[in-house]
Amino acid sequence: MFTGLIEHLGTVSDIVRDEGGCTLAISDSAVILGDCHIGDSIAVNGACLTVTEFHPEEKGGWFKVWLANETLSRTELGQRTIGDQVNLERAMGAHVRFGGHFVQAHVDGTAVIAGSVSDGDSLRLTFKLPESTSERPSLLPYLIPKGYVTIDGASLTLTAVNDAERSFSVMLIQHTQQKITLSKKKLGSEVNIEVDMVGKYVQKSVSAALGGSGDEGLRELIEKVVKDVLDKRAQ
């Protein structure tokens, strides 16, 4: 479990690809390796990855993680190149204050940066989600203004949601801009998205209670209930 509060920016220093996925080496990371062990979880740009090797005293401290093809298909990590900075967060300890929100670091999908506007010292960013498919349903039902969203591992507050345009917006204060990679990404860049897991549980529970299955089943059931109410009023 994570909080979405980025601890440090690491640097991709090596990439080794094969048919099963790839291995990333991330350097300049000594600050988060003091209590590291093989098998620990570290969120890299919002994706929970397992440490397979680490050396806290070489190259400013570096560690390696393995990315399976499933992870590469669901995240933007396959687009990283040597020299790129990435957001890093260790799994939450039981002895620390809980900030941000409950983040699993299980990326739900990606979006692209569609707009960037300065607002004083702050930065307003707009993102566009891809069209939904049967394999990748839309994430829009889980996004609400003033709700939470995790972008590249950073817990952020939604300032606006536009269902018609499949877009949503956040605002980064100056401090946040300096602590995460998001403000450095260009328009059109892809980012990792994880929606609030509470919303997913609520939707599944409501769907199950109504006897449906999934997004389409829930929509059909709601439409049927509305139709029944309107039919009764028309009688």
Image: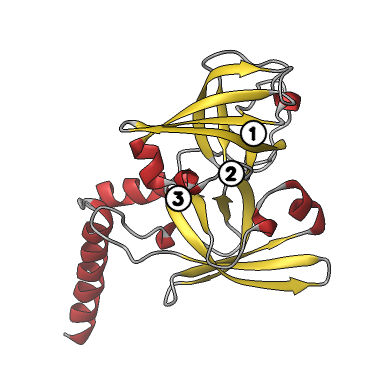
Dot label at residue 168: none
Q: Of helix, strand and loop, which one carries label 3?
A: helix
Q: Which residue is mark 2?
A: 153
Q: Which residue is mark 3?
A: 199
First-in-chain label (1 vs 3): 1
- Does residue 50 sit above or below 70 in this rendering? above
Report the mark closest to the observer, 1 or 3. 1
Report the mark closest to the observer, 3 or 2. 2
- Residue at the image position 64 percent from the left and 43 percent from the top: 83
Q: Of helix, strand and loop, which one carries label 1?
A: strand
Is the C-beta separation of discs 1 and 3 under 8 Å?
no
How packed mark 2 is, by other alpha carbons closer than 10 Å (few <14, some 14-19, many 20 or more), is many
Colour convention of the picture: secondary structure
Is the C-beta separation of discs 1 and 2 under 8 Å?
yes
Q: Amino acid at mark 1?
A: Glu
How packed mark 3 is, by other alpha carbons closer than 10 Å (few <14, some 14-19, many 20 or more), is some
Q: Can the viewer see residue 36?
A: yes
- Residue at the image position 44 percent from the left and 46 percent from the top: 75
Q: Amino acid at mark 2?
A: Gly
- Residue at the image position 50 percent from the left and 50 percent from the top: 192
Q: Can the viewer see residue 104?
A: no
Q: Position of residue 222 (x, y in %)?
A: 26, 65
Drawn side of residue 169 relative to residue 225, left or right: right
Q: Which residue is mark 1?
A: 89
Residue 224: quarter of image: bottom left
Q: Amino acid at mark 3?
A: Gly
Tell how many labels.
Answer: 3
Q: Position of residue 2 (x, y in %)?
A: 59, 33
Q: CA distance from mark 1 to mark 2?
A: 8 Å
Residue 33: quarter of image: top right
Relative to the observer, which residue lies in front, 233 or 169?
169
